Image: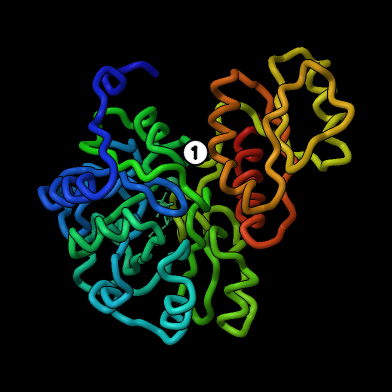
Amino acid sequence: MTDDRTAALPEVVEGELGVARAAEVIRAGGLVAFPTETVYGLGADATDPAAVARIFAAKGRPADHPLIVHLGDAGLVEAWADVVPPEAHLLADAFWPGPLTLLLWRSPKAPDAVTGGRDTVGLRVPDHPLALRLLEAVGDGVAAPSANRFGKVSPTTAADVVADLGASVDLVLDGGPCLVGVESTIVDLTGEAPVVLRPGGVGLDRLAEVLGREVPVHSGPAPERAARAPGMLAAHYAPTARVVLAEAATAAEVTAALVARGEGRVGLLAPGVTDGLSPEVVELEPAGTPEEYARLLYARLRQADRLHIEWLVCVPPTARGVGVAVRDRLARAAAASQP
Ligand code: TXA
Ligand code: MG
């Protein structure tokens, strides 16, 4: 897609001075892309429906998709949520600041523009020094989805944000590459028992440890899932390349079969080096641990697109810790790649 967005570029700022400018822009109703430990967010004043509306326009995202409200201090939860159950306190104490979003019943403070008209609100205190200083300077909630165009993978660098959003964002606060690399874990605390709506930066094992019980990942039929966490459609996690999943033992075979079909360049993303690859296969640099895989996942998917890879064979990491979230995103990308 070529349009005016690439013609003009947003201002990119860093450090303390950048934080002060970013807070000014947000307080004036503007849009600031800012770093978090998970992915970059596209932020606006969560109390200002007109500012929040600009987020949807910049992303090209349907207006009924709810946004996460980012807070600089867990003490603000009481202002944004109507009911704060004991589990919320346990999880906030254990994981905030950090890659965890709590879904709670909203207070009247949370506008429809943020919640998509729902009675619930997603809240999170991110673990990034610039994000925290920005949120402190703003002094209240900042609504922010990931700072990508609708349908692209989340950005993990300021350059990715600029490439996706161009001048439709007023300011980009550059805090370097994101250290977690996949989005926050979303835990719904509005039902009878806690449920994970999206696996993310906080592993299921750690949630279970803190709550003293297993927390199931919501796995109802797709329409029902979409109703509980809109914006989780498979296509949201897909690069342009078609993603095919394989095991380490079969990766060489699967890539060879795709090369033989002669339908475009074939790439491989795996946690380790794969033996016996045919020379036509573009092997993206491997990331060993699930943590490394998560940190590099979206950058690798974007790199695959830049290299004009048509078929990207992915060997998922082990399902441990954040590896569960990586497997979830890869499965969605693979599902979106089905004709
Ligand atoms: O790590 C993250 O969570 C990043 C950073 C920027 O904080 N944010 C992020 O936002 O991934 P977004 O909008 O791309 O994904 C948020 C997800 C969406 O699937 C949305 O449907 C769900 O959270 N969500 C937010 N508020 C909700 C609500 N009230 N009810 C149901 N789902 C909600
Ligand atoms: Mg997103």
Q: Position of residue 7 (x, y in %)?
A: 27, 17
> How many numbered discs?
1
Query: What residue is drawn where x is 57% and y is 59%?
Result: 199
Q: Position of residue 97 (x, y in %)?
A: 41, 67
The furthest residue to the left: 28
Query: What residue is drawn where x is 68% and y is 25%?
Result: 311
The residue type indicated by label 1 comes to Val
User: Is 115 in front, or is 294?
Assistant: 294
Q: Position of residue 70 (x, y in %)?
A: 32, 61
Query: What residue is drawn where x is 63% and y is 33%?
Result: 337
From the viewer's perspective, tell me whether residue 80 is left or right of residue 305. left
The furthest residue to the front: 16
**Which of the 4 image quadrants contains residue 263?**
top right
From the viewer's perspective, tell me whether residue 258 is left or right of residue 198. right
In the image, residue 173 above or below residue 125: above
Secondary structure beneath dot 1 equals loop
Q: Is the CB–ligand 2 distance for label 1 below 8 Å?
A: no
Please state the quadrant of the image where ligand 1 appears.
bottom left
User: Crowding near pointer 1: few (<14 within 10 Å), some, many (20+)?
Assistant: many
Mark 1 sits on what residue?
153
Query: What residue is drawn where x is 70% and y is 38%?
Result: 286
Q: Position of residue 74 (x, y in %)?
A: 33, 74
Coloration of the structure image: rainbow
From the viewer's perspective, tell me whether residue 297 is left or right of residue 108. right
User: Is 134 in front, or is 57?
Assistant: 134
Where the N terminus falls, by quadrant? top left
In the image, residue 132 above or below residue 60: below
Residue 178 in view: yes
User: Is 307 in front, or is 287?
Assistant: 287
Where the C terminus falls, by quadrant? top right
